[in-house]
Image (cartoon, rainbow, N blue to C red):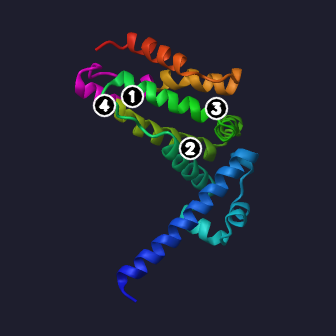
Amino acid sequence: MSEERVRRRTGGRSARVRRAVLDATLRAVAEQGPDAVSVPEIARRAGVHETSVYRRWGTREHLVVDALLAYSEEQLRIPDTGTLRGDLIAFSDSLAAYLDTPFGKALVRSMAAAADGQTLAESREEFWTSRFDLARTMIDRAVARGELPEDTDPAFLLETLIAPLHFRALLTRRPVDGHRTARLVDLLLADHPS
């Protein structure tokens, strides 16, 4: 067998196993919360041996973070509309739609309700750092275009944008419409002039 054929077949199986494990993890987190997820249960759900899960992810916490990041990256792509306002509205609309799905609600609520042990706290920090690193691209582009001052704090701006959306999803449990996201972005940008 050629080396290229072996590599393709292995990569294909590896990708299928990764997808099956991540999907099983997401379902388990949504159903039970991150504290109740176990590697043996995930392996059973995914139809793989638990040593495969441990070999790839090492810990349950790394597995949960990887599953949530992969899902977030698929569902919450970083837009590039050409303007900061357009990017933030598109991003907010996407986040609001995600938070309004049964699966999105279950994931966010289970993560919010999870116990704050050191390992889970570190995993949560890893998740949010990764998400902010991706989303800050919108802010960096806006600074380069002159839409925001160079000393803009990307994390603060993004936290200010997403906090009301999470508030509605977690506390008031009301959906967010596009009109509300546009108003939220306009309010935020009025406080961050270029």
Label 2 or label 1, whichever lies nearer to me, is: 1
Q: Pick whichever of labels 4 and 2 is earlier in the sequence.
A: 2
Horizontal relation, residue 101 to residue 134: left or right? right
Residue range highlighted in magenta: 139-157
Label 4 or label 2, whichever lies nearer to me, is: 4
Q: Cβ–Cβ below 8 Å for labels 4 and 1?
A: no
Local secondary structure at mark 2: helix
Does the magenta portion include 156?
Answer: yes
Distance between the alpha carbons at the discs numbered 2 and 1: 29 Å
Local secondary structure at mark 1: helix
Distance between the alpha carbons at the discs numbered 3 and 2: 27 Å
Q: Which mark is residue 100?
A: 3
Label 3 or label 4, whichever lies nearer to me, is: 3
Distance between the alpha carbons at the discs numbered 4 and 2: 26 Å
Determine the residue located farthest toward the front in the rendered image.
178
Return the residue at label 4.
140
Horizontal relation, residue 44 to residue 133: left or right? right
Return the residue at label 2.
122
Q: Residue at x 58, y 32 (%)?
A: 97
Query: x, y percentage for residue 122?
Result: 56, 44
Q: Pick whichever of labels 3 and 2 is earlier in the sequence.
A: 3
Query: Could you tell me which quadrant the C terminus lies in?
Result: top left
